[in-house]
C-alpha cells in the first residue's frame, strides 16, 4: 500500500510511504515519470515531510524524528546518512500516513507531546487580538 504522497518544492520528486516490502518505508520517485524509486528510510519509516527547501527529508521511526540530507539536483537523488534528531513520547497517530507534525519556515518542529494532565489541548483562536488586548492592558502580570 502506498500512502502520504508529497511533492518536493521544485515538483520534480514524489515522496511517499509504502509497505510493499513488508515493512513501511519512505521512498522517493522522479515525478511525473515515476519510473524508478529510491528508499530513503532505514529500519522503517512513516509520516515523511520535505524540508521547505527540499534538501532534507524528515520521517518518524517509532518515537524518533529522523532527518536525511537530500541532493536532488541531478537526474538521481543522493541521500546522506539518516540522523535521529530527537526522540520523545510525541503523539504519533498510529495508522496515519500523513504527518501529524509540521515544520516552521525556520526549520523548527511543531508537534503534540503527551502530558500527564489527561491529554488536554488548548487552542487559542484569534490570538493576535488577544495579544493586542493583553498589551493594551499593560501586559502579563
Image (cartoon, rainbow, N blue to C red):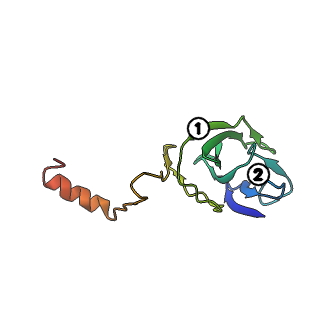
| Element type at mark 2 | strand
Identify the residue position indicated by label 2 in the image. 27
- The residue mark sitting in front, 2 or 1, is 1
Residue 60 x %, y %: 64, 49
Q: Residue at x 67, y 58 (%)?
A: 6
Q: Residue at x 43, y 58 (%)?
A: 119
Image position of 104 with respect to 84: above or below: below
Name the quadrant containing residue 31: bottom right
Q: Are marks 2 and 1 in contact (CB under 8 Å)?
A: no
> In the image shown, does 122 or 130 lie closer to the viewer?
122
Q: Is residue 55 visible?
A: no
Identify the residue position indicated by label 1 in the image. 85
Q: Is residue 82 visible?
A: yes
**First of labels 2, 1 by sequence position:** 2
Other residues around mark 2 within 10 Å, as few (<14) / some (14–19) / many (≥20): many
Q: CA distance from mark 2 to mark 1?
A: 19 Å
Residue 56 x %, y %: 64, 42
Other residues around mark 1 within 10 Å, as few (<14) / some (14–19) / many (≥20): few
| Element type at mark 1 | strand
Name the quadrant containing residue 137: bottom left
Residue at the farthest left position: 137
Residue 74 x %, y %: 78, 42
> In the image shown, does 40 or 7 lie closer to the viewer?
40
Amino acid at each position: 500500500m502506498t500512502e502520504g504522497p508529497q511533492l518536493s518544492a521544485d515538483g520534480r520528486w514524489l515522496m511517499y510511504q509504502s509497505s510493499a516490502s513488508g515493512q513501511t518505508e519512505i521512498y522517493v520517485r522522479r515525478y511525473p515519470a515515476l519510473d524508478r524509486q529510491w528508499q530513503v528510510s532505514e529500519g522503517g519509516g512513516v509520516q515523511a515531510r520535505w524540508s521547505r527547501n527540499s534538501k532534507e527529508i524528515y520521517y518518524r521511526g517509532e518515537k524518533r524524528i529522523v532527518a536525511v540530507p537530500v541532493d536532488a539536483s541531478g537526474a538521481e537523488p543522493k541521500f546522506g546518512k539518516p540522523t535521529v534528531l530527537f526522540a520523545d513520547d510525541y503523539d504519533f497517530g498510529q495508522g496515519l500516513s500523513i504527518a501529524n507534525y509540521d515544520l516552521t519556515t525556520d526549520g523548527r518542529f511543531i508537534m503534540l507531546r503527551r502530558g500527564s494532565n489527561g491529554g488536554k489541548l488548548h487552542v487559542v483562536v484569534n490570538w493576535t487580538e488577544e495579544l493586542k488586548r493583553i498589551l493594551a492592558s499593560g501586559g502579563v502580570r
